[in-house]
Image (tube, rainbow, N blue to C red):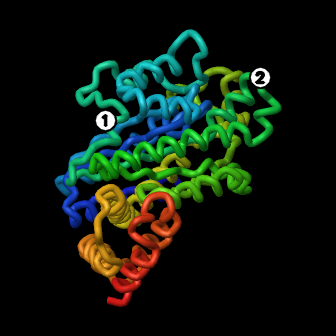
Amino acid sequence: MKEKVLEIQEKLNIKLANFFYKNQIKHFRITSLGNSIATGYSIYRTTKPLLLRNKNLIKTLKSFNITTDIYHFARAQNNSDEHILEWLLTNTKQSDINELNRHDFNGSFNRMPNKITFDKINEYYPNQIEKDLGLSDVVSNKDTNTANIIVYNGCTGSFLDNLSRGNILKGLSLQGFNRDILSLEAILKYINTQNRYNNSNTQVYICGVPNFLGINISEIINRKLKRIALEFPNTTYVEPVKSKVFYKEIEVNENEKLESLQSKIKQSLLKIDIHYDEEEYLKLNNNIISSIHDNYLLIDSLICVDRLFYQFSKKIELERLKITGEEIQNTLYNLLITITQKFNSPKFKRKFLHIVKRYLINRYSYDFYYLGKKNITNSINKLNIK
């Protein structure tokens, strides 16, 4: 089964590389941001940074002359979304996050249970980094030839902190989830503001909480994540993976021979873990790559519409422009024509215009009021006819 997942992964990598090449994207920066899933952590199975589990991604992109940078701003504990927001606002560097992970996996105090060797800790979380960027630096990239992607796994940290740190009553409620969602929205607002004012084009892919045993209990929180993704022009939702929850424990070195009866018994018992195993992490990577391929052009274009329409609305407001509704419609129409020129499919263009209309009308009162709702809808409808 794992071989089949890897085969699918290789095809998806090639598909994404070909898409980037055709759209003149020369550099791919992908960053895993968030909680223990974002670190690729497992209690009883292999712990390895999430995006590094896609072993052939860099090599495949390189064969299309596309360079790749991979960052992991994620931690296996103390990872509530409020802390993630702190990393963003303080521009915490990758080396600082690496040091936190070294502490989590190899420190003497509050060390996380894990199956990772010291050599692997040094490999995955080095002290010296050539491009030691801060998180704010990463999300603010504005190179037009760079696909800048944030893969976000979060909204579980406060819930788990409540359960494991003495607030059982809070833990059994949704209080922890709701607390994390407030910070998630703040993070998305910050990134969207950078896109509007800094001309960056950062996209965020929010991964759903694992589908434990396939019974969809996590839909309680995932429904909220889907709703939030629709509220931001640069954000989309990535389906989670069905997780087994019960796993066999492995030795640090899976090739090591088991010599004792105690060790053999230990290997045969199933252990509970809310994190993915090796194959499930591969499947999650596949969902991420597939989602980037399917949504990148839509989101990139929606970011552009959001920025230009927002700036135009502010210009009308602050400069008190004497401009007619017809002139506004013509300006919006011409902007949309320019943005949709890259679409080679009428069906794709209609899908994009549907998304644009829904987004602009939803945020009309807050961000686009001075454009006029009628002018917005008429300009979109006019383009939809073409």
Q: Residue furthest top?
A: 108
* Residue sitting at x 33%, y 19%: 127
Q: Nearer the viewer, residue 241 or 195?
A: 195
Q: Nearer the viewer, mark 1 or mark 2?
A: 1
In the rendered image, the quadrant that contains the N terminus is bottom right
Residue 103 visible in this rendered orientation of the protein: yes
* Residue sitting at x 52%, y 58%: 231
Residue 238 image position (x, y, % from top left): 51, 56
**162 left or right of 241 in image:** right
Residue 322 image position (x, y, % from top left): 29, 69
**298 left or right of 226 in image:** left
Say if 352 sits above or below 136 in the image: below
**What residue sits right under mark 2 in the picture?**
166
Image quadrant where residue 315 sits = bottom left
Say if 150 sits above or below 238 in the image: above
Residue 14 visible in this rendered orientation of the protein: no
**What residue sits right under mark 1 in the picture?**
137
First along the sequence among labels 1 and 2: 1
